[in-house]
Amino acid sequence: MNLLVLCPHFAPDLAPTGEVMTQITEQLAARGHRLHVVTSLPWYVHHAVEPEWKGSVVHHEDTHWGRITRVHPFPTDKRNIPARALGFAGFTGLSGLAALLTRSRPDAVLAMSPPLTLGAAGWTVARAHRVPFVFNIQDVFPDVAVELGAITNPRVIAVASWLERETYLRADAVTVLSDDLRQNVAAKIAGRRGRSGDPSKVRVIPNFIDTDWIRPTERENSYRTEHGLEGKTVVMYAGNVGLSQSLELVLAAAAHLADDPDVVFVINGGGSARPGLERAAAGLSNVRFVDMAPKARLPEVAAAADIHVVPLKAGLARSSVPSKLYTILAAGRPVVASVDPGTEVANTVTNAGAGLAVGPDDPEAFTKAILSLVQDPARARAMGESGRRFVEQWASPAAVAEAYESLFDELRH
């Protein structure tokens, strides 16, 4: 098949969704398919186009499996919602145009959200070529933005909700990461007329982790040496330091354990919330901020922690499944998750015996959970081992690519 893929990030960009789509693309190519990927110029780490990619609005790259077209993402401050909306519109317009001008007629189109607007571009291109359109949802928007308070204007929310629903209805299939996300999306189209409103077109195809690449390895590694963490009990948050994470909980736990010289809290990553968080942590000598490491060092970063944390603000776990959870489980480390109960993250942590799940935005419960694992390292190690056994049963990148291949074949016939 000739497949056209529209996604916000792609290697060498370091965004988690970029890694997901890069591996799916590579696996589909290994199965003999040709692909044209339309994405952005790399910009995720510094929220600005990387220096080596500046100077062009559109960049084409031919590969052994097809072509990559990268367009300018028009990056803006995440907190400036009007500017960000304009940036998404500009990126979507360029992406849609580049996709329409693809050199070969696609047999199917796959678009990833967020941004939600990329779904409209994907549908337009699929309609122009009269081929199936599959809409992949990583985070459910505008739900996430509303929960964060990033969007409060009722008219803006209404327009975004209308665009979300209409894109679901026009897609031939919508793929989500978990059963609770499937219920969320299916409820929004249920009762609509005809096939377009059939909730059965919402399919669960989970993300994945390469368990051969991310493996349990020694804690005392070069990452610890580089950052002066030798011999410490390391509690780590690794990922985007943005508006979705309740990282104030990490500072609260650090303040509670400030008198224990053996425990260090590491916040590894960057994002719009980091400057404010660093100011709030100024008096805490047991908190370290580390810039995001290159992708090649991810196994080492994951292994350097004794305990990982996943703190999501209230309501967000119903609309999002952070990919960092898969990395933590594959690395064989325990996790303390502060998330909404009954959601995919909470259920996975509990069912896997991989750590402790507490309610969101509860500093006391979060701190107690971390303290219990710090004080019982044998229990923490056992939880990490249990998580590793659990994740080894998950779908591999190849299996996920096969699921998409089967879905494309089903929709074409």
Image (cartoon, rainbow, N blue to C red):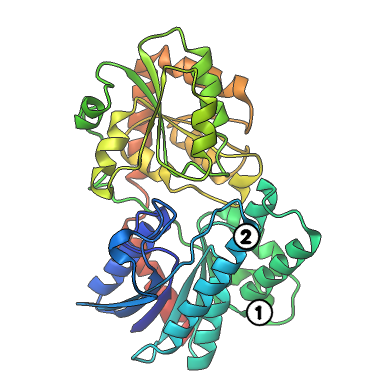
Q: Nearer the viewer, residue 44 or 275?
A: 275
User: Label 2: which residue?
Assistant: 141
Contact between marks 2 and 1 (CB within 8 A): the answer is no
Q: Nearer the viewer, residue 241 or 136?
A: 241
> Circle 1 — which element?
helix
Residue at the location (57% across, 29% down)? 248
Visible residue check, residue 12: no
Question: Which residue of the protein is positioned furthest toward the front in this rendering?
Answer: 55
Q: Is residue 155 left or right of residue 126?
A: right
**Image x and y of residue 252, in percent:** 56, 21
**Image x and y of residue 59, in percent:** 32, 76
Circle on res. 127:
none
Is residue 240 shown above or below 135?
Answer: above
Q: Amino acid at mark 1?
A: Ser
Rendering quarter of residue 103: bottom left
**Image x and y of residue 299, in percent:** 26, 41
Between the residue at mark 2 and the residue at mark 1, the CA separation in whole angstroms equals 19 Å
Classify mark 2: residues with Cα within 10 Å, few (<14), some (14-19) or many (20+).
many
**Closer to the N terminus: mark 2 or mark 1?**
2
Classify mark 1: residues with Cα within 10 Å, few (<14), some (14-19) or many (20+).
many
Question: Which residue of the protein is positioned furthest toward the top in this rendering?
Answer: 259
Residue at the location (69% across, 66% down)? 160
Residue at the location (59% across, 68% down)? 86
Q: Quadrant of the N terminus?
A: bottom left
Camera-near label (2 vs 1) is 2
Residue at the location (50% across, 56% down)? 177
Q: Amino acid at mark 2?
A: Phe
Visible residue check, residue 245: yes
User: Label 1: which residue?
Assistant: 196
Q: Nearer the viewer, residue 87 or 235?
A: 87
